Image (cartoon, rainbow, N blue to C red):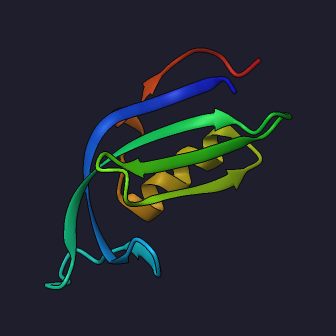
Amino acid sequence: MKSYATIARRAVRILGHPNSGWSPADPDDDNALQIEFRFEITDDGNKNFLLVCHSLDGRYAADTWHETLEEAVACAQDSYDIAPSEWMMSGPTT
């Protein structure tokens, strides 16, 4: 799969457990864990995109499917508060 954008290391506050599900935490949630993640936007093997994230310790992982690169970037911003300027872009989508 081709990689279009990456963030090699970024702290994310999450709630939950590796084997029973997890999600990004609200900024004011005192029960949240702060964990280092890697983010990548790849193709899905067709003409669409995956936003893929995994914790650097290997315990947490997730992905979401998107029709466009812009939608994947917007999802990262909405879900993980990642600004579009944080991404290291790898090249054009064509």
Q: Name the residue located 65 percent from the left edge and 16 percent from the top edge.
A: 92
Where is residue 70 drawn, in percent x and y?
Answer: 62, 41
Where is residue 41 drawn, in percent x and y?
Answer: 57, 37
Asked if residue 2 is positioned above or below residue 85 in the image, the reply reads above
Where is residue 4, by image quadrant? top right
| Residue furthest out toward the left | 30
Where is residue 67 drawn, in percent x and y?
Answer: 77, 47
Asked if residue 36 is positioned above or below residue 93 in the image, the reply reads below
Q: Quadrant of the C terminus?
A: top right
Where is residue 81, by image quadrant? bottom left
Q: Quadrant of the N terminus?
A: top right
Q: Name the residue located 21 percent from the left edge and 77 percent from the top edge.
A: 32
Where is residue 85, by image quadrant? top left
**Count of numbered tags:** 0
Q: Name the residue located 42 percent from the left edge and 75 percent from the top edge.
A: 22
Closer to the camera in the image, 91 or 44: 44
89 on left or right of 12 = right
Closer to the camera in the image, 52 or 90: 52
Q: Name the residue located 54 percent from the left edge and 47 percent from the top edge.
A: 52
Where is residue 49 drawn, in percent x and y?
Answer: 70, 41
| Residue furthest out toward the right | 46
30 on left or right of 94 = left
